[in-house]
């Protein structure tokens, strides 16, 4: 792609992606990739935009924003699920921090 470069990257919650694509779909016809992404986020979005940002804000007290966004997307239910999110990362995370993350996530977890 000639003449295009990334100026800035910012992780956003999946609920924000859903809202953005739905707004875009009202105005324009979505591309194939955008339609696939919209289908995915409709299936897997568990929180609304406001709750997602509140959860990210609370999680940022414990972990960096990029990890907070991942946690918001996955909403891990136990320590094993949470450890999977950090399996490839080289940052050490204490068990106390993992427990605190799970407590914060439990406050926002939707009832099934």
Image (spheres, rainbow, N blue to C red):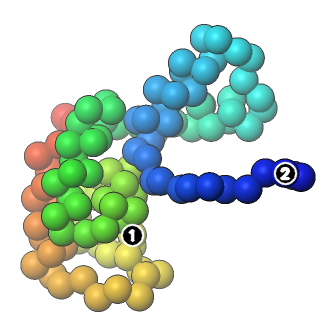
Decide if residue 43 is in sight here.
no
Quarter occupied by the C terminus: top left
Camera-near label (2 vs 1) is 2
| Residue 52 picture quarter | top left
Q: Is residue 26 left or right of residue 35?
A: left
**7 up-or-down from 14: above or below:** below
| Residue 75, x across and y down, in percent | 30, 52
Tell me the element at label 2: loop
Between residues 101 and 84, which one lies in front from this camera angle?
Answer: 101
Q: Nearer the viewer, residue 32 or 62?
A: 62
Judged left or right of residue 54, residue 86 is right
Residue behind mark 2: 3
Q: Which x, y percent locates residue 22?
A: 54, 21
Residue furthest to the top in view is: 26
Question: Residue shown at 84%/51% (left/top)?
Answer: 3
Residue furthest right in the image: 2
Question: Eyeballing the image, is 23 above or below 73?
Answer: above
Q: Residue at x 26, y 51 (%)?
A: 56
Q: Nearer the viewer, residue 71 or 65?
A: 65
Quarter of image, res 91: bottom left
Which residue is found at the position 47% from the left and 53% from the top? 10
Number of other residues with Cα within 10 Å of mark 2, as a class: few under 14, some 14 to 19, many 20 or more: few
Nearest to N terminus: mark 2 or mark 1: 2
Residue receiving disc 1? 85
Q: Residue at image x 70%, y 15%? A: 28
């Amino acid at each position: 792609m000639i003449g295009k470069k990334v100026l800035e990257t910012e992780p956003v919650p999946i609920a924000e992606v859903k809202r953005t694509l739905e707004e875009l779909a009202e105005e324009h016809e979505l591309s194939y990739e955008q339609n696939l992404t919209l289908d995915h986020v409709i299936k897997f979005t568990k929180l609304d935009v406001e709750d997602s940002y509140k959860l990210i804000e609370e999680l940022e007290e414990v972990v960096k924003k990029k990890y907070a966004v991942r946690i918001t997307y996955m909403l891990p239910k136990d320590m094993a699920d949470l450890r999977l999110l950090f399996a490839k990362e080289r940052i050490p995370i204490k068990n106390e921090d993992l427990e605190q993350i799970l407590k914060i996530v439990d406050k926002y977890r939707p009832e099934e």
